[in-house]
Image (cartoon, rainbow, N blue to C red):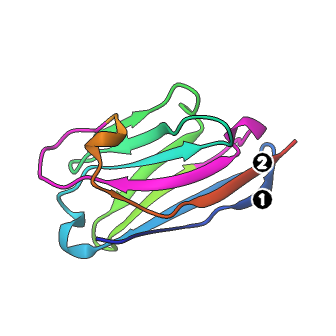
């Protein structure tokens, strides 16, 4: 399984970006997926997660600003990021889990596949 992220870049505070994650179509429709981020010197943290049935979870730090969604017909996961802040600066990773349980997964060990990441930098 391959996950390929895109959409990162440099944006000013208050701006928006939309991240995309293209996944292998054969398992995409049954996987829970998530977006993680890792800033220099910090641990990887869950930003948002979505189940196979589109149940969603958001970290408190991004609630009301970020929206996770998936399009099974395009085998793509999205993260719409609005009102970006300098503290959102990080490498953002897409993750996917095998299996068919309709649940959001909240810890890295729950995910079987990871993308290479896309850098998001928010300037003040």
Q: Is residue 104 magenta?
A: yes
Residue 105 picture location, percent across and down: 29, 38
Q: Residue furthest front?
A: 41
> Which residue is located at x 30 percent, y 41 percent?
109
Separation (CA) of disc 2 from disc 1 = 6 Å
Residue 5 picture location, percent across and down: 50, 66
Q: As drawn, is 99 to the left or to the right of 18?
A: left
Instruction: Identify the residue under disc 1.
Output: 10
Q: As rendered, which of 111 and 124 lies closer to the eye?
A: 111
Q: As drawn, is 69 to the left or to the right of 124?
A: left
Residue 40 picture location, percent across and down: 68, 42
> Which residue is located at x 36 percent, y 41 percent?
108
Quadrant in the rendering for residue 114:
bottom left
Instruction: Identify the residue under disc 2.
Output: 122
User: Are there few (<14), some (14-19), or many (20+) residues within 10 Å of tag 2?
Assistant: many
Quadrant of image for the C terminus: top right
Q: Residue furthest right?
A: 124
Residue 82 picture location, percent across and down: 65, 45
User: Are there few (<14), some (14-19), or many (20+) residues within 10 Å of tag 1?
Assistant: some
Q: As rendered, which of 36 and 18 lies closer to the eye?
A: 36
Magenta-colored span: 81-105
Q: How many marks?
A: 2
Q: As drawn, is 101 to the left or to the right of 40?
A: left
- Name the secondary structure under disc 2: strand
Relative to 36, residue 45 above or below: above
- Name the secondary structure under disc 1: strand
Tag 2 near tag 1, CB within 8 Å: yes
């Amino acid at each position: 399984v391959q996950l390929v992220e895109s959409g990162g870049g440099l944006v000013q505070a208050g701006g928006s970006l939309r991240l995309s994650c293209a996944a292998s179509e054969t398992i995409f429709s049954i996987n829970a997926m998530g977006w993680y981020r890792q800033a220099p010197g910090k641990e990887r943290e869950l930003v948002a997660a979505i189940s196979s049935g589109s149940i969603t979870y958001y970290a408190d730090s991004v609630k009301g600003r970020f929206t996770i969604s998936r399009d099974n017909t395009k085998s793509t996961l999205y993260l719409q990021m609005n009102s970006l802040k300098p503290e959102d600066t990080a490498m953002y990773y897409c993750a996917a889990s095998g299996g068919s349980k309709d649940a959001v997964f909240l810890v890295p060990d729950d995910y079987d596949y990871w993308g290479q990441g896309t850098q998001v930098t928010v300037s003040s």
